[in-house]
Amino acid sequence: MARWRPDIAEREATPEALYLRRREFLALGAAGAVGLLLPRGARAGEPTGAALQVARKVDQAGGESPTPWDSVTGYNNFYELGTSKEDPSRNAGSLRPRPWTVTIAGEVKKPQTLDVDALARMFPLEERVYRMRCVEAWSMVIPWVGFPLADLVRRLEPTSRAKYVAFQTLLDRDQLPGQRRPVLPWPYVEALRIDEATHPLTLLAVGLYGRALPGQNGAPLRLVVPWKYGFKGAKSIVRITFLADRPHTTWNDAAPDEYGFYANVNPDVDHPRWSQARERRIGEFFRRKTLPFNGYAAEVASLYAGLDLRKNY
Protein backbone atom coordinates (compact mmCIF):
# COMPACT_ATOMS: atom_id res chain seq x y z
CA MET A 1 0.00 0.00 0.00
CA ALA A 2 1.39 3.40 -0.94
CA ARG A 3 1.86 5.60 2.08
CA TRP A 4 0.12 8.96 2.01
CA ARG A 5 2.43 11.95 2.27
CA PRO A 6 1.69 15.66 1.97
CA ASP A 7 3.34 17.61 -0.85
CA ILE A 8 5.03 19.93 1.65
CA ALA A 9 5.92 19.70 5.31
CA GLU A 10 3.36 20.98 7.80
CA ARG A 11 5.81 23.60 9.05
CA GLU A 12 6.04 25.09 5.55
CA ALA A 13 2.31 25.55 5.06
CA THR A 14 0.49 28.80 5.85
CA PRO A 15 -2.65 28.13 7.93
CA GLU A 16 -5.65 28.44 5.62
CA ALA A 17 -7.46 31.01 7.77
CA LEU A 18 -4.38 33.24 7.85
CA TYR A 19 -3.75 32.88 4.10
CA LEU A 20 -7.29 33.95 3.25
CA ARG A 21 -6.97 37.00 5.48
CA ARG A 22 -3.45 38.09 4.51
CA ARG A 23 -4.59 41.49 3.26
CA GLU A 24 -6.08 42.28 6.65
CA PHE A 25 -2.82 41.19 8.24
CA LEU A 26 -0.78 43.55 6.07
CA ALA A 27 -3.16 46.41 6.69
CA LEU A 28 -3.10 46.07 10.46
CA GLY A 29 0.55 45.23 10.93
CA ALA A 30 1.88 42.21 12.80
CA ALA A 31 1.02 43.39 16.32
CA GLY A 32 -2.62 44.07 15.52
CA ALA A 33 -2.99 40.98 13.39
CA VAL A 34 -2.00 38.30 15.89
CA GLY A 35 -5.70 37.79 16.62
CA LEU A 36 -6.30 37.04 12.96
CA LEU A 37 -4.45 33.77 13.40
CA LEU A 38 -7.77 32.47 14.72
CA PRO A 39 -10.87 32.17 12.55
CA ARG A 40 -13.50 34.80 13.34
CA GLY A 41 -15.67 32.22 15.06
CA ALA A 42 -12.80 31.07 17.26
CA ARG A 43 -12.70 34.50 18.90
CA ALA A 44 -16.43 34.61 19.48
CA GLY A 45 -17.66 31.01 19.49
CA GLU A 46 -19.26 29.52 22.60
CA PRO A 47 -19.20 25.82 23.53
CA THR A 48 -22.18 23.85 22.27
CA GLY A 49 -23.64 20.42 22.98
CA ALA A 50 -24.99 18.73 26.09
CA ALA A 51 -23.60 20.07 29.36
CA LEU A 52 -21.79 17.57 31.58
CA GLN A 53 -21.83 17.39 35.37
CA VAL A 54 -18.23 18.02 36.43
CA ALA A 55 -17.20 17.12 39.97
CA ARG A 56 -13.99 19.16 40.01
CA LYS A 57 -11.79 21.29 37.76
CA VAL A 58 -8.02 21.07 37.73
CA ASP A 59 -5.61 23.32 35.84
CA GLN A 60 -2.65 21.24 34.68
CA ALA A 61 -1.50 23.62 31.96
CA GLY A 62 0.42 26.11 34.08
CA GLY A 63 -2.30 28.75 34.03
CA GLU A 64 -2.36 29.09 30.24
CA SER A 65 -5.63 30.18 28.68
CA PRO A 66 -7.47 27.36 26.91
CA THR A 67 -7.52 27.41 23.13
CA PRO A 68 -10.89 28.78 21.91
CA TRP A 69 -13.69 26.28 21.37
CA ASP A 70 -13.94 26.87 17.64
CA SER A 71 -10.25 26.08 17.14
CA VAL A 72 -10.36 22.99 19.38
CA THR A 73 -13.37 21.69 17.44
CA GLY A 74 -12.49 23.05 14.00
CA TYR A 75 -8.82 22.19 13.51
CA ASN A 76 -8.39 18.46 14.04
CA ASN A 77 -6.55 15.33 13.02
CA PHE A 78 -9.07 12.51 12.70
CA TYR A 79 -8.29 10.69 9.45
CA GLU A 80 -11.39 8.55 9.78
CA LEU A 81 -13.30 11.75 8.99
CA GLY A 82 -10.84 13.09 6.41
CA THR A 83 -7.19 14.05 6.09
CA SER A 84 -7.41 17.85 6.08
CA LYS A 85 -7.68 19.74 9.36
CA GLU A 86 -11.16 20.99 8.47
CA ASP A 87 -12.57 17.65 7.28
CA PRO A 88 -13.43 16.24 10.74
CA SER A 89 -15.71 19.14 11.67
CA ARG A 90 -17.32 19.08 8.21
CA ASN A 91 -17.91 15.33 8.25
CA ALA A 92 -18.61 14.66 11.93
CA GLY A 93 -22.37 14.63 11.36
CA SER A 94 -22.14 11.11 9.96
CA LEU A 95 -20.82 9.76 13.29
CA ARG A 96 -23.61 8.44 15.52
CA PRO A 97 -22.28 8.43 19.11
CA ARG A 98 -25.42 6.83 20.58
CA PRO A 99 -26.11 4.01 21.13
CA TRP A 100 -22.48 3.07 21.78
CA THR A 101 -20.82 0.21 23.62
CA VAL A 102 -17.22 -0.45 24.61
CA THR A 103 -15.93 -4.02 24.80
CA ILE A 104 -13.22 -4.75 27.37
CA ALA A 105 -11.31 -7.98 26.83
CA GLY A 106 -8.00 -9.78 27.17
CA GLU A 107 -5.93 -10.14 30.32
CA VAL A 108 -8.55 -8.96 32.82
CA LYS A 109 -10.56 -10.81 35.44
CA LYS A 110 -13.71 -8.87 34.54
CA PRO A 111 -14.10 -8.73 30.75
CA GLN A 112 -17.35 -7.05 29.78
CA THR A 113 -19.20 -4.87 27.30
CA LEU A 114 -20.45 -1.55 28.66
CA ASP A 115 -22.74 1.16 27.41
CA VAL A 116 -20.63 4.32 27.14
CA ASP A 117 -22.99 6.35 29.32
CA ALA A 118 -22.98 3.67 32.01
CA LEU A 119 -19.20 3.68 31.83
CA ALA A 120 -19.04 7.45 32.32
CA ARG A 121 -21.40 7.23 35.31
CA MET A 122 -19.07 4.85 37.13
CA PHE A 123 -16.68 7.64 38.06
CA PRO A 124 -16.89 11.35 38.97
CA LEU A 125 -16.11 13.45 35.91
CA GLU A 126 -13.23 15.91 36.15
CA GLU A 127 -12.24 18.82 33.96
CA ARG A 128 -8.49 18.67 33.33
CA VAL A 129 -6.85 21.53 31.43
CA TYR A 130 -3.91 20.01 29.54
CA ARG A 131 -1.33 21.21 27.07
CA MET A 132 -1.64 19.04 23.95
CA ARG A 133 1.08 18.70 21.29
CA CYS A 134 0.69 17.38 17.75
CA VAL A 135 3.58 15.62 16.03
CA GLU A 136 3.12 18.14 13.19
CA ALA A 137 4.51 20.88 15.50
CA TRP A 138 1.31 22.64 16.52
CA SER A 139 -0.27 22.65 19.95
CA MET A 140 -3.35 23.64 21.95
CA VAL A 141 -4.50 23.97 25.55
CA ILE A 142 -7.68 21.95 26.03
CA PRO A 143 -10.06 21.59 29.01
CA TRP A 144 -10.96 17.91 28.73
CA VAL A 145 -13.76 16.29 30.73
CA GLY A 146 -13.32 12.67 31.71
CA PHE A 147 -12.04 10.29 34.35
CA PRO A 148 -8.64 8.73 35.06
CA LEU A 149 -8.14 5.56 33.06
CA ALA A 150 -6.51 4.11 36.18
CA ASP A 151 -9.90 4.09 37.92
CA LEU A 152 -11.34 1.84 35.23
CA VAL A 153 -8.26 -0.39 35.12
CA ARG A 154 -8.47 -1.06 38.85
CA ARG A 155 -12.13 -2.01 38.58
CA LEU A 156 -11.41 -4.45 35.73
CA GLU A 157 -8.65 -6.23 37.70
CA PRO A 158 -5.94 -6.96 35.11
CA THR A 159 -4.13 -10.27 35.43
CA SER A 160 -0.42 -10.46 36.17
CA ARG A 161 0.16 -11.04 32.44
CA ALA A 162 -1.27 -7.67 31.42
CA LYS A 163 1.60 -5.44 30.27
CA TYR A 164 -0.11 -3.33 27.57
CA VAL A 165 -3.51 -1.78 26.92
CA ALA A 166 -4.74 -1.37 23.31
CA PHE A 167 -7.52 0.96 22.18
CA GLN A 168 -9.45 0.40 18.95
CA THR A 169 -11.52 2.97 17.07
CA LEU A 170 -14.87 2.21 15.46
CA LEU A 171 -14.65 0.61 12.01
CA ASP A 172 -17.66 1.80 10.01
CA ARG A 173 -17.21 3.33 6.56
CA ASP A 174 -20.67 4.90 6.64
CA GLN A 175 -20.13 6.69 9.93
CA LEU A 176 -16.42 7.37 9.30
CA PRO A 177 -16.14 8.09 5.57
CA GLY A 178 -12.39 8.60 5.72
CA GLN A 179 -12.08 4.84 6.18
CA ARG A 180 -13.17 4.39 2.57
CA ARG A 181 -9.66 5.46 1.58
CA PRO A 182 -6.64 3.25 2.41
CA VAL A 183 -4.58 6.09 3.84
CA LEU A 184 -4.02 3.99 6.98
CA PRO A 185 -4.60 0.34 7.91
CA TRP A 186 -8.05 0.37 9.51
CA PRO A 187 -9.30 0.06 12.19
CA TYR A 188 -7.16 2.56 14.06
CA VAL A 189 -5.34 1.04 17.03
CA GLU A 190 -3.16 2.68 19.66
CA ALA A 191 -1.66 1.30 22.84
CA LEU A 192 0.10 2.16 26.08
CA ARG A 193 2.18 0.23 28.54
CA ILE A 194 0.04 -0.52 31.55
CA ASP A 195 2.09 1.80 33.78
CA GLU A 196 1.41 4.62 31.29
CA ALA A 197 -2.27 3.72 31.17
CA THR A 198 -2.56 3.88 34.95
CA HIS A 199 -0.60 7.12 35.36
CA PRO A 200 -2.78 9.80 37.03
CA LEU A 201 -2.51 12.11 34.00
CA THR A 202 -4.03 9.59 31.57
CA LEU A 203 -7.72 10.22 30.93
CA LEU A 204 -10.62 8.64 29.16
CA ALA A 205 -12.41 11.76 27.92
CA VAL A 206 -16.13 12.12 27.27
CA GLY A 207 -16.18 15.88 26.78
CA LEU A 208 -14.37 19.18 26.56
CA TYR A 209 -15.19 22.68 27.77
CA GLY A 210 -17.84 21.12 30.04
CA ARG A 211 -19.78 19.78 27.05
CA ALA A 212 -20.22 16.35 25.49
CA LEU A 213 -17.35 15.43 23.18
CA PRO A 214 -18.04 16.47 19.56
CA GLY A 215 -17.63 13.89 16.81
CA GLN A 216 -14.56 15.56 15.34
CA ASN A 217 -12.81 15.28 18.70
CA GLY A 218 -13.50 11.56 19.08
CA ALA A 219 -17.02 11.19 20.45
CA PRO A 220 -18.19 9.57 22.55
CA LEU A 221 -14.99 8.29 24.20
CA ARG A 222 -11.32 8.99 23.52
CA LEU A 223 -7.92 8.59 25.11
CA VAL A 224 -5.96 11.62 26.35
CA VAL A 225 -2.26 11.27 27.23
CA PRO A 226 -0.88 14.82 27.54
CA TRP A 227 2.85 14.04 27.54
CA LYS A 228 2.64 12.19 24.20
CA TYR A 229 2.03 13.37 20.66
CA GLY A 230 -1.61 13.54 19.72
CA PHE A 231 -1.70 10.46 17.51
CA LYS A 232 -1.57 8.31 20.66
CA GLY A 233 -5.04 9.59 21.58
CA ALA A 234 -7.34 6.98 20.04
CA LYS A 235 -10.78 8.42 19.26
CA SER A 236 -14.30 6.94 19.13
CA ILE A 237 -13.13 3.91 21.10
CA VAL A 238 -15.12 0.68 20.83
CA ARG A 239 -12.66 -1.83 22.28
CA ILE A 240 -10.07 -1.86 25.09
CA THR A 241 -7.85 -4.94 25.24
CA PHE A 242 -5.30 -5.89 27.89
CA LEU A 243 -2.34 -7.78 26.43
CA ALA A 244 0.80 -9.59 27.52
CA ASP A 245 2.78 -8.53 24.44
CA ARG A 246 3.17 -5.15 22.79
CA PRO A 247 0.54 -4.85 20.05
CA HIS A 248 0.87 -3.39 16.58
CA THR A 249 -0.30 0.22 16.43
CA THR A 250 -1.57 2.06 13.37
CA TRP A 251 0.92 4.87 12.77
CA ASN A 252 3.87 2.81 13.96
CA ASP A 253 2.95 0.13 11.40
CA ALA A 254 2.22 2.64 8.63
CA ALA A 255 5.41 4.71 9.05
CA PRO A 256 7.78 3.24 11.65
CA ASP A 257 10.57 5.64 10.67
CA GLU A 258 8.34 8.61 11.54
CA TYR A 259 6.01 7.49 14.32
CA GLY A 260 7.46 5.52 17.21
CA PHE A 261 5.45 3.39 19.57
CA TYR A 262 6.14 5.59 22.60
CA ALA A 263 5.43 8.96 20.95
CA ASN A 264 6.72 10.89 23.94
CA VAL A 265 7.20 14.58 23.18
CA ASN A 266 10.96 14.89 22.74
CA PRO A 267 12.26 18.15 21.22
CA ASP A 268 15.65 16.53 20.64
CA VAL A 269 14.31 13.90 18.21
CA ASP A 270 13.13 15.45 14.96
CA HIS A 271 10.47 14.02 12.75
CA PRO A 272 12.22 13.06 9.47
CA ARG A 273 10.40 15.89 7.68
CA TRP A 274 10.45 18.70 10.26
CA SER A 275 12.00 19.83 13.52
CA GLN A 276 10.30 19.12 16.85
CA ALA A 277 12.37 21.72 18.72
CA ARG A 278 9.71 24.42 18.41
CA GLU A 279 5.93 24.45 18.07
CA ARG A 280 3.14 26.84 17.11
CA ARG A 281 0.46 27.20 19.75
CA ILE A 282 -2.76 27.70 17.84
CA GLY A 283 -3.68 31.37 18.22
CA GLU A 284 -0.11 32.61 18.64
CA PHE A 285 1.98 34.27 15.95
CA PHE A 286 5.46 33.15 17.01
CA ARG A 287 6.68 29.63 17.65
CA ARG A 288 7.67 28.61 21.15
CA LYS A 289 10.21 26.13 22.46
CA THR A 290 8.92 22.57 22.75
CA LEU A 291 9.15 21.19 26.29
CA PRO A 292 10.29 17.62 27.03
CA PHE A 293 7.28 15.40 27.69
CA ASN A 294 5.18 18.44 26.69
CA GLY A 295 6.02 20.08 30.01
CA TYR A 296 5.04 17.07 32.14
CA ALA A 297 8.55 15.71 32.73
CA ALA A 298 8.33 16.10 36.50
CA GLU A 299 5.31 13.80 36.54
CA VAL A 300 6.23 11.17 33.95
CA ALA A 301 9.99 11.06 33.24
CA SER A 302 10.47 8.35 35.87
CA LEU A 303 8.36 5.98 33.75
CA TYR A 304 11.20 5.86 31.23
CA ALA A 305 14.24 5.63 33.48
CA GLY A 306 16.96 3.70 31.64
CA LEU A 307 15.13 3.83 28.30
CA ASP A 308 16.97 5.42 25.36
CA LEU A 309 14.41 8.00 24.26
CA ARG A 310 16.21 8.65 20.98
CA LYS A 311 15.78 5.06 19.89
CA ASN A 312 12.44 4.53 21.65
CA TYR A 313 10.77 7.60 20.20
Image (spheres, grey):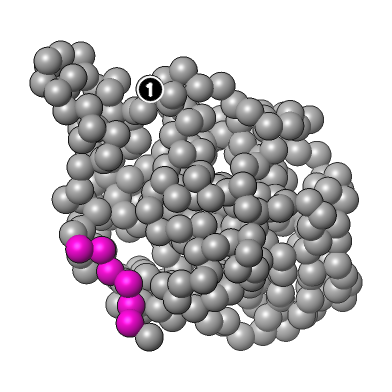
Q: Nearer the viewer, residue 165 or 67?
A: 67
Magenta highlight on residue 182? no
Q: Where is residue 42? Give x, y as percent.
A: 43, 26
Q: Quadrant of residue 140?
A: top left
Element marked by disc 1: helix
Q: Nearer the viewer, residue 212 or 272?
A: 212
Q: Where is residue 87? Give x, y as percent.
A: 45, 50
Q: Quadrant of residue 313?
A: bottom left
Q: Where is residue 190? Give x, y as percent.
A: 55, 69
Going by the image, does 56 lie left or right of 258? right
Instruction: Give the main secondary structure, helix, strand or loop, of the magenta stretch.
Output: loop
Q: Quadrant of the N terminus?
A: bottom left
The residue depicted at 50 percent of the width and 64 percent of the height is: 178
Q: Please rate how many residues cluster around mark 1, counting C-alpha atoms within 10 Å: few if below 14, some from 14 to 19, many from 20.
A: few
Q: Where is residue 43? Give x, y as percent.
A: 42, 20
- Residue 134 vertical position relative to residue 58 in the rendered view, above or below: below
The kind of residue on which mark 1 rests is Arg
Q: Which residues are magenta?
A: 2-7
Numbered disc total: 1
- Residue 199 vertical position relative to residue 273 in the rendered view, above or below: above
Going by the image, does 242 lie left or right of 82? right
Let me know if residue 200 appears in the view: no
Going by the image, does 93 lie left or right of 61? right
The residue depicted at 50 percent of the width and 22 percent of the height is: 45
Residue wearing tag 1: 40
Q: Quadrant of residue 115?
A: bottom right
Let me know if residue 255 appears in the view: yes
- Residue 193 vertical position relative to residue 143 in the rendered view, above or below: below
